[in-house]
Structures are given as C-alpha cells and as structure tokens.
Amino acid sequence: MEATLTKWGNSIGVRIPSQMASEIGFHAGSKVELRSHRNQIVIQPRYDLKEMYESYYHKPLSEITANDVGNSKEMDWGGDVGAEVID
C-alpha cells in the first residue's frame, strides 16, 4: 500500500488508511511506539500496565479487586519447546 509523507510543523507525517488501522486496532488517540530498525520505521501499539489490566478484566483499574486477580484463568502458552525445566 502506498502513502505520501506530508509536512506537519517541523516534522513529517504519514496517514494510515482506516482499513489498515482497524486491522491493527489503531484509532485516533492510540498510543504507539516508534523506532527505526535497519532503515525502516516500525510503528507498534504501546500499552501501559493500567491499559493492559483494564483490557484483560474489562473494567476500570479502580474496580479491579484482589478477588478478580486471584480468580484469573491460567493462560496456555503452548507446549514445551527446547530444554525448559518445568517443576
């Protein structure tokens, strides 16, 4: 997909097409992490711990209790790979 860089103050900007943004989960106001890697620009979502908890428990951080955390489902990370030692 092609895009054009445009001047934005002392910087330059690029518009992310709405279809691509929705596939990734970006929306106006999304926080992103920018970095350069081997002559490429990488843009990825940036989450803080508060947002991660609220997303996981589907409620504001102020309403998450020890009971919620204590009853969390275990996450399946898949089968063992390599030489892990599981006790």
Image (cartoon, grey):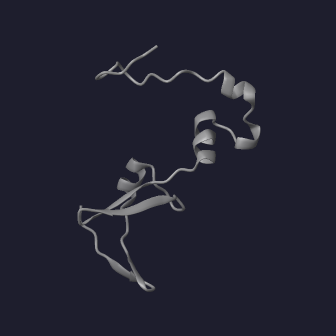
- The location of residue 42, given as percent across then percent down, is 33, 59
Identify the residue at image location x=28%, y=69%. 3
The answer to whether 74 is drawn above or below residue 12 in the figure is above
Identify the residue at image location x=43%, y=86%. 10
Given residues 76 and 55, the one toward you in this image is 76
Which corner quadrant of the image does residue 57 belong to? top right
The answer to whether 22 is drawn above or below residue 74 in the figure is below
Given residues 71 and 17, the one toward you in this image is 71
The answer to whether 46 is drawn above or below residue 3 in the figure is above
- The location of residue 61, given as percent across then percent down, is 70, 42
The answer to whether 53 is drawn above or below residue 80 in the figure is below
Identify the residue at image location x=51%, y=58%. 30
Q: Residue furthest top?
A: 87
Please identify the quadrant where the N terminus is shown: bottom left
Identify the residue at image location x=51%, y=59%. 31
Query: Could you tell me how many numbered marks the image carries?
Result: 0
- The location of residue 83, given as percent across then percent down, is 31, 21
- For residue 32, side relative to residue 16 (left or right): right
- The location of residue 75, given as percent across then percent down, is 49, 24
Which corner quadrant of the image does residue 62 belong to? top right
- For residue 29, side relative to residue 64 (left or right): left
Given residues 36 and 83, the one toward you in this image is 83
Q: Residue furthest bottom?
A: 10
Which corner quadrant of the image does residue 58 belong to? top right
